[in-house]
């Protein structure tokens, strides 16, 4: 696949995300890669992220704010001093290469597997299990019926997110993105397909958004709001998610988030499964006053057109960045893009992780 440089010029205009200046609008989306053995960041991850430092902003893979909440077996954490120390090596390396990096902080909720967490049960907004199971490096696991969180437990998790943000700051991150997407814990509270509560955390938009609001407020006490982003996927059916009115949800979120003056909102425009269809981008863009990053299936040309037409301020690329460590330069030159290898997305070594060629190495 190739693109013409003139068609993508809008992606190479600088942008201010809150108080962070970025040189281009080609964002690296968060990508789970399962290389953090025992949930510990490592040298291989340092190399991987540093290779991709030319993006306007790197958003890391989802990172656990509390132990024993694993959904994939080898996702990283940010809850121990050792993890902070190892992440600091990564942020230092990315910064030395001229990059900027936010950590995506996360709790999987009902997508947690007790088998991966010493038997610790999954939790969620309501006791509704994800149908089916998932394959991890440790094998196939069926999802369990989660325990509904009490209001006291919710407050403990708010503090876990705060502590995660504090540790991310110690580790040298430029900011954090709160993961409110893809059927994980905060998303489970936002959407009525997973939240049937009738207390302070369910039954109305105001209540369904309360947990997210409390997390954002806590995190913004650590980083200023101008260094905090949040990600949503109102249509995505991944993890057995649905909502009765996703358009109304994004309208409420846009109005609700305006006063918070965050660095950005990161909105996934579609459904991984292709089943739930609606235009959630237009109503959100019309109502939200801040910077908007869009994601999901954008070609370089469509991304540039979207930014040029002001439907978004930047575009986050996932698999394209996975397979092309120098993605901004390839787009700028109209060069061919490497094809990603799905067989190595979630393996645990360098193959399909740090060995994709750059233009420079391909020409050598």
Image: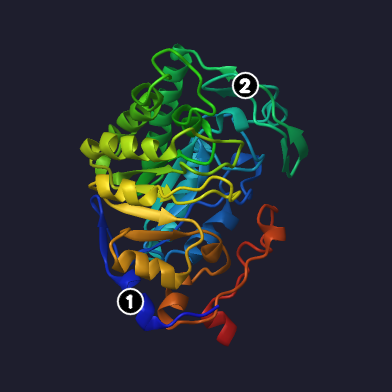
**Mark 1 and mark 2 in contact (Cβ < 8 Å)?**
no
Q: Secondary structure at mark 2?
A: loop
Give the number of the disc on residue 9. Answer: 1
Residue 170 seen in the figure = no
> Which residue in the protein does label 2 denote?
146
Q: Residues within 10 Å of mark 1 (few under 14, many from 20)?
A: some
Q: Residue furthest right?
A: 139
Q: Is residue 62 above or below residue 197?
A: below
Q: Position of 31 compared to 212: left or right?
A: right
Q: Residue at x 39, y 40 (%)?
A: 247
Residue 57's quadrant in the figure?
bottom left
Residue 1 on image: x %, y %? 55, 78
Q: Nearer the viewer, residue 139 or 245?
A: 245
Q: Report the coloring of the rendering.
A: rainbow
Q: Nearer the viewer, residue 188 or 157?
A: 188
Residue 23's quadrant in the figure?
bottom left
Q: Residue at x 74, y 44 (%)?
A: 137
Q: Secondary structure at mark 1?
A: helix
Residue 341 on image: x %, y %? 67, 65
Residue 293 on image: x %, y %? 36, 54
Q: Nearer the viewer, residue 169 or 126?
A: 126
Question: Could you give the CA–CA distance between mark 2 and mark 1, rounded to whole angstroms?
Answer: 48 Å
Q: Residue at x 37, y 79 (%)?
A: 7
Q: Residues within 10 Å of mark 2 (few under 14, many from 20)?
A: many
């Amino acid at each position: 696949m190739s693109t013409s440089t003139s068609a993508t010029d809008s992606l190479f205009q600088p942008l201010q995300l809150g108080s962070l200046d970025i040189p281009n609008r080609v964002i690296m989306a968060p990508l789970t890669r399962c290389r953090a053995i025992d949930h510990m960041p490592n040298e291989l991850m340092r190399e991987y992220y540093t290779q991709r430092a030319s993006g306007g902003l790197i958003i890391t893979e989802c990172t656990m704010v509390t132990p024993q909440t694993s959904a994939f077996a080898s996702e990283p954490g940010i809850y121990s001093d050792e993890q902070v120390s190892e992440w600091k090596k990564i942020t230092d390396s990315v910064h030395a290469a001229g990059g900027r990096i936010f950590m995506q902080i996360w709790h999987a909720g009902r997508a947690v597997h007790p088998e991966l967490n010493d038997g610790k049960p999954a939790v969620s907004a309501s006791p509704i299990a994800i149908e089916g199971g998932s394959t991890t490096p440790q094998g196939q696991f069926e999802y369990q019926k989660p325990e509904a969180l009490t209001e006291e437990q919710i407050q403990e998790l708010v503090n876990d997110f705060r502590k995660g943000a504090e540790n991310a700051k110690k580790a040298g991150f430029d900011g954090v993105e709160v993961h409110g997407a893809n059927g994980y814990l905060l998303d489970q509270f936002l959407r009525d397909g997973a939240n049937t509560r009738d207390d302070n955390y369910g039954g109305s938009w105001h209540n369904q958004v309360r947990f997210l609001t409390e997390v954002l407020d806590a995190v913004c006490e650590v980083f200023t709001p101008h260094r905090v982003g949040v990600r949503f996927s109102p249509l995505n059916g991944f993890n057995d998610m649905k909502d009765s009115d996703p358009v109304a949800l994004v309208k409420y979120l846009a109005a609700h988030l305006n006063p918070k003056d965050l660095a950005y909102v990161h909105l996934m425009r579609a459904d991984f499964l292709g089943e739930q269809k609606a235009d959630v981008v237009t109503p959100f863009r019309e109502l939200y006053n801040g910077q908007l990053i869009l994601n999901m299936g954008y070609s370089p040309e469509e991304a540039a057109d979207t930014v040029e037409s002001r439907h978004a301020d930047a575009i986050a690329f996932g698999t394209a960045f996975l397979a092309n460590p120098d993605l901004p330069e390839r787009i700028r030159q109209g060069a061919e893009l490497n094809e990603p290898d799905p067989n190595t997305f979630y393996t645990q070594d360098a193959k399909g992780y740090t060995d994709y060629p750059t233009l420079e190495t391909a020409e050598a």
